[in-house]
Structure formats: C-alpha cells, structure tokens
Amino acid sequence: MIRRLQSLPRGPRILIFILIFAGIFLALAGGTVILILLSINNVPRQTAQALAEGAAVAEYAALPDNDAYPSTVAVGPDGTVYTASYRTGTVWAVGPDGAAREIPNSRDRFESVTGLAARSDGDLLAIAFTGGDDGAWAVWRVTQAGDITRFGTVDDAQGMVSPFDIALDDSGAVYVVDRSRADIWRWDADGGSPELWWSLLTAPQSIVQMPGEPVPVFAARPAPTGLAYDPIHNALLVADPDLNTIVRIPLSRGASELLYAYDPALESQAFPPGFDGIAVLPDGRIVVTALDQKGLVLLRGDGPYVGAPPSYVAGNFRGPSDVAALPDGRVVVANFDSLALAQPGVYPQLPFGLDVVTLP
C-alpha cells in the first residue's frame, strides 16, 4: 500500500495525505464531542439550593411530560400555580399538593406558550403560538374547562415577533413585552385593539444608583423578556437579560427609572446574571431569575441597585426562566432547562419541575 502511494505523482499523494489527516482530525473531534455529551448527560439531576441565611428551597411539582420545558409560571388568586410548555403548548394547573392537572384542549390548540397571567375571574391569559391557517403569536383567554378564545394580537405590519411575558395591572389591563421589538403592548381588560404603550428603545429618564457610581453605558440593544406589575408604585417592571437591567415604568407613563444595571467593570459583578422572569412581593421587594447564573436574585426595598452586586438567595436551578409569588410570601420558580433545546445531543434533566423558595 505504501509503495503504491509512493509511486503516485506528487499531487495525488498530497491529496491522499490531506484526506487521511482530515479523517483522523474529524474522528478525534467527533470522539471529543461524544465524550463531552456523555459527561453532560450523565451528571446527576441538579437540585436548587438556598444561598442566603433564612432561605429554603424545595421541589413544588414535577411535570408529567418529557418535553415540558416550562417557560413561564403564574399564580391565581386562590394560590393555584400555572405553568406551560414552550415546546408543546400544554398548560398545567398545579394545586398545593403538587399534582399537575392538564388544562383541556391546550395541548391541541397551542404549539408554544411563553407567558401566562391569571385573571381575577379564574381564567388565564396565555401568550401562545398556534399552527395551521391562523399560525401566529397572540394572547388567548383560557378557561379552567378548556374553552380557548383569542383575546388579542398585534395587527400591524410586524405583528408579534417574540412576545415573552405578560402582566395585569389592578384594573385588569393587559401588558405584553416583545423581546425582538423591545415594545410593550397594552389591551383593556376586555381585549379589543392593542395600544403600543411603551418602547424600551427609549432610555430610562432617571437612575436609582449607588452614590459615586458612574452612569452605566449600554452597548447592546434592549431585549426585554421579564414583565411584572408593581402595585406599590403603580408601575411595570421590565427585566432585560442582554443589558442585565431592571427598569420601572409608571403606568402614568412618566419618567422611567433604571433600578438595576449590571456593571462588568466591578469585581463583585464578574458574572452577568442574565435577568429573565421577574415578580413583585406584597412588601415591595423584587425577585428576578438570573438565567445565566442559574440563580434567584432578591432586591430589597427601593434600592439603590445600580452599582450594587446582585443578592442571590438561591441557586443551582435548571434554567430558571420565570418566577411568581404565592399568597403566603414564597415564590415559585420554573426550571426551563433550555440547554437541551439549543444544543443537539443534550438531554434535559428529567423530570421537568417547579421549585418553591422561602425567602429570608
């Protein structure tokens, strides 16, 4: 074999050696990828842990589907917890015993759900994508019995591009934040035509910051994903994982405030949190999921937060995508485990589930 190769002209010999070395390289690379995937998929299932004194974490519910991927969580007036699948669109109601009940027709009607809100009348509002002839993102009203009707959508030239979260104010008005458009849309409590309520491309007019800290400068475009109503300030809170900011916008549409901004120049903030889901507690404290750090951050009081390191109360979640407050002051966190969606060959750490956190 070697003699035959040596007898070939120089050009074909070079080509053959290149192919041999390329094959060896690809085999080594493929073996490395397989070893990496085996190491990722063979680790024990991560269990969230408390990181602050007085905090506690426990599993609240395990979801039945192997492709649940719970992207959102909401709590009804009676304390019932609701979550939904980004992958299949299935919506579940979870009672205090942790048993998950599938909302009828949601699996068949929806292909994906990114946000849920519970109305005072017991119905749900879901940001969902539907297939078929009417395939598009819209807000849907879902009853406990599984009656599903369109509540509203954005009907301009762009439509809803990447709607991520939904919130209700005290009057029942509905707000939806679109990550790609960096917009917040508003509907009256009974639906109808939406109003472009706010653009996050408008910089905050005031900053609640630590004394002596420089005003942060943001190079990235806003990409908001988290939305919550703050009844104490009658305002909306918006979390942005790309900018790592939290902005408060009064419903009067007065001056917006930058409540928190990650500053990579500070040694205490070496790891950007990747803020995602956000909720407001009855006492005014703010909880926000740090998706990039697999943690839950608690912001106490009115700040200042700009220039202050985030205060983690729990960590080691499996992709904390959203958070909602229970009537007793605890919060529920959805474990999205989205790495398996983004990385071929990586499997989720089953079962998908919700965790409950007792805050200090």
Image (cartoon, helix red, strand yellow):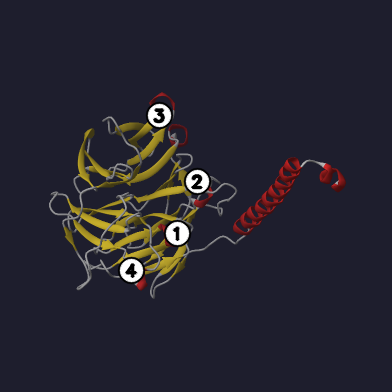
Residue type beneath disc 1: Asp
99 and 320: which one is in front? 320
Q: Quadrant of the C terminus?
A: bottom left
Mark positioned earlier in the residue sequence (3 or 2): 2
Residue beneath disc 4? 265
Give, as a three-letter code, the residue at label 3.
Answer: Gly
Q: CA distance from mark 3 to mark 2?
A: 21 Å
Q: Residue at x 25, y 67 (%)?
A: 305
* CA–CA distance in space, label 4 to label 3: 44 Å
The 10 Å Cα crowd at callout 1, few under 14, some 14 to 19, many 20 or more, is many
Gap between marks 1 and 3 measured at Cα: 32 Å
First in sequence: mark 4 vs mark 1: 4
Q: Earlier in the sequence, mark 4 or mark 3?
A: 3
| Mark 3–mark 2 CB contact (< 8 Å) | no
How far apart marks 1 and 2 lie (CA) works out to: 15 Å
Amino acid type at circle 2 is: Ala
**Label 4 to label 2: alpha-carbon separation:** 38 Å
Q: Residue furthest bottom?
A: 53
Q: Nearer the viewer, mark 4 or mark 2?
A: 4
Relative vertical location of residue 295 with respect to residue 155 in this rendering, above or below: below
Q: Name the side, left or right, on which 303 lies relative to 62.
A: left
Residue that numbered label 1 is attached to = 355
Residue 332 image position (x, y, % from top left): 39, 57
Mark nearer the viewer, 4 or 1: 4
On the question of residue 146 being in view, the answer is: no
Pointer 1 or 2: first along the chain:
2
Mark 1 touches mark 2? (CB < 8 Å): no
Local secondary structure at mark 1: strand
Instruction: Give the quarter of the image for residue 209.
Output: bottom left
Q: What residue does disc 2 label?
A: 68
> The N terminus appears in which quarter of the rendering?
top right
